[in-house]
Amino acid sequence: MDAKTDHPLLFTPLRVRGVTLPNRLVVPPMAQYSAVDGVATDFHREHYGRLAVGGAGLIFVEATGVTAEGRITNGCLGLWNDVQRAALAPIAAAMKAQGAVPAIQIGHGGRKAAMQRPWFGNGPLTDADLARGERRWQPLGPSAAPLSEGWLVPRAMDAADMARTRRAFADAACRALEAGFEVIEIHMAHGYLLQSFVSPLSNLRTDAWGGSLEGRMRFPLEVAESVRAALPDDVPLFARISCEDGIEGGWTMDDSVAFARALGQRGVDVIDCSSGGNTPRGATNANLQRSPGYQVPYARRIRAESGVMTEAVGLIREPQFAEQVLRDGGADLVAVGRQFLYEPFWGLHAAHRLGIDPDFRRWPHPYAWWLEKWDKGIRAREAAERGES
């Protein structure tokens, strides 16, 4: 609890530029792979509408491609045209109507683009996928080096490709604002385009966008500059990074601290701290022992050494643990992902369990009316069982 107010930090507002988050709880981007030509469907509206009621202060729409070839799968959302923007607007409005700040992650799949939806294998597209109607396209990357054997060989990007991609990121950010989103996050993690530039495992260039750490960071930093320049000063900008590759000779935490400092200097406000993904074994670091808060040390160190606010993520399931992460200085924000899919009202339950919403006042009024009576009935029965009058 906050020593001065005895109020949970998890439910203390946080101001980032011109946006005040009502609490420190975040639903991070979780791809649903269910769009049609990059356009959100009824499923997305129901999915995000359900999450909007759940009590998080900040909710991110999943990784959204800035170009058609930047989609990770055929089912990924896009923001390269106004039809896609219009389909996302009701989602942002639903979040806002429930008191959450609507946010979106924009990205480019790079050499991992044009892959299978995860439930079909999470690997390269096969003839069976094509028979289902999936399409294959030419991926892009820093170098003509495939993710692994059997994966598509990306085309090494030239200066014109990079200029077009920078513009696409900026244009997507502007469309996101037009759709009603109030926070933008750039996806720089998990082996996708921008993370593949910073990692020496995937960036084999010898020109100005490769070689040294400064060279490998150059293009992602240029993208951050382009997006920041396209946004009004009061709009927060986040960046999700993989804090380490988890592979010998790859990207390290020391590199991430330097990257976070450089991103902060270019107007990024919060670093969303994940890891791994630069291999075909999954989206995140397959080499880590997964336990509650297993990626919190990344957020703690970057926060301490870069001077940039951080968001912690990684099997954070219990309200008391989320609160402890904040109290211990592990991060400024805490992201709860898959637990929100399992328990869409997780944030409201957390407020009840941490003792700041005993009467269900944070719930939608039609729910609260029923739940207050339900709770009184339970307490009355428990009292009777204890022999209390």
Image: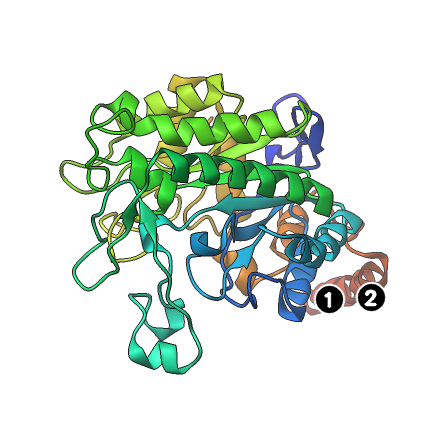
Snapshot quadrant of residue 200: top left
Q: Which secondary structure lies at badge 2? A: helix
Q: Which residue is mark 2?
A: 370
Query: Residue 13, relative to residue 107: is it above or below?
Result: above
Q: Which secondary structure lies at badge 1? A: helix
Q: Position of residue 30 (x, y in %)?
A: 50, 55
- Please report the residue visible at 78 percent of the width from the left and 63 percent of the height from the top: 371
Residue farthest along the front direction in this orientation: 160
Where, quadrant-wise, is the N terminus in this rendering? top right
- Please report the residue visible at 53 percent of the width from the left and 41 percent of the height from the top: 168
Question: Identity of the amino acid at label 2?
Answer: Trp
**Mark number displayed over residue 156:** none
**How would you rate the neighbour count of disc 1 (Cα within 10 Å): few for under 14, some for 14-19, many for 20 or more?**
few
**How would you rate the neighbour count of disc 2 (Cα within 10 Å): few for under 14, some for 14-19, many for 20 or more?**
few
Q: Which residue is mark 1?
A: 378
Q: Position of residue 230 (x, y in %)?
A: 61, 29
Q: Is residue 201 left or right of residue 218?
A: left
- Please report the residue visible at 59 percent of the width from the left and 25 percent of the height from the top: 229
Query: Residue 296, relative to residue 95: is it above or below?
Result: above
Query: Residue 378, relative to residue 308: is it above or below?
Result: below
Alpha-carbon span between mark 1 and mark 2: 13 Å
Residues 184 and 353: in front is 184
Residue farthest along the left direction in this orientation: 248
Q: Position of residue 322 (x, y in %)?
A: 51, 41
